[in-house]
Image (cartoon, grey):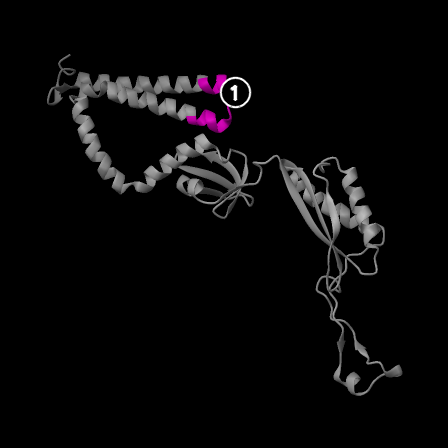
Amino acid sequence: MQVLEQKIYGNVDVKDLLFFLVILLFALLLARIVNRYLRRSMQEKLSRDQLQLITKMVYYGFLGGAVLFSIPLLGQKLSGLVVAGGVVGVVIGFAAQNIVSNFISGVFILIERPLKIGNSVNVAGTVGIVEEIRIMSTIIRTFDGLYVRIPNITVFTGTLTNYVANVVRRVEYVIGIRYSDDAARAIRIIRDIFDREELVLVKPEPDVFVDNLGESSVNIFVRFWAPADEWWDLKMKLLWRLKQALEAEGIQIPFPQRVLWDGEAQEHPGPRGKRRPVSRLPTPGRDG
């Protein structure tokens, strides 16, 4: 008992310090129990980021309340702490503006929800999947497997592109065919592919039309709408199907060609007064 009544400083003894620590440990244990209950009971009613915001507020609320409740045990008056806290707050505010900004931005992100866990996004040039939204930063896993931590002030005030926020996205192609091919027939083949694909939306209706006449090809512009979560896979799958279907019907995608005339042909015309053409330049990847 004499050990418990031994003074540490002022009127604070070992017993007061032990009570202070017990209250903090009890608050910590209670906060974890309440958070576990909230996760189990509310996980089907709230989104993951909303539940994360609530559990963090509860957790830090219990700890903050325990500190305010038990601080008199250490010989400190709350009124004095308020004044001291105001002065310290001003000093810390100037020294840690970025930290405060990130904290406030994190709260607004969790409330406004411009992005959610699992979304495919582009944040300040970083493209990937949102793995975690913390109170100070957001974690993004890039498509090549890198984990990038982005301060919340950048997420909240910078340019943010959410690729799956809308339920549908548009896919666009430009398909070039030879001038000798039938463009109307090519359009019918493309539309037939779309009609047989159930993930291509009927409304808005797919657009397939001749967009422009290029140097070496007739360019057909293609666009259609698809579910956002199937956008990439469907885009790659249909592009391959279109290539196979057009080639099966004898419609080819041309490559750029150039015809050159040598100087001798200009001075010495060939038969019938025509200049002799030099063979076209080989195209990498096509002529071997």
Q: Is residue 134 visible to us here? A: no
Q: Main secondary structure of the magenta part?
A: helix
Q: Quadrant of the N terminus?
A: top left
At a point 41% along the width and 39% down the height, the residue shown is: 152
Above or below: residue 68 compared with residue 207:
above
At a point 55% along the width and 45% down the height, the residue shown is: 144
The stretch in magenta equals 38-53
Residue bearing the label numbered 1: 45
Quarter occupied by residue 56: top left
SS assignment at label 1: loop
Q: Is residue 142 left or right of residue 76?
A: right
Q: Is residue 202 left or right of residue 7?
A: right
Residue neighbourhood size for the residue with mark 1, other residues' Cα within 10 Å, grouped as few (<14), some (14–19), many (≥20): few
At a point 52% along the width and 20% down the height, the residue shown is: 45
Quarter occupied by residue 214: bottom right
Q: Identify which amino acid the numbered label 1 is placed on.
A: Lys
Residue 40 part of the magenta segment: yes
The number of numbered discs placed on residues in the rendered structure image is: 1
Above or below: residue 271 compared with residue 176:
below
The residue lying furthest to the top in this view is: 1
Residue 237 part of the magenta segment: no
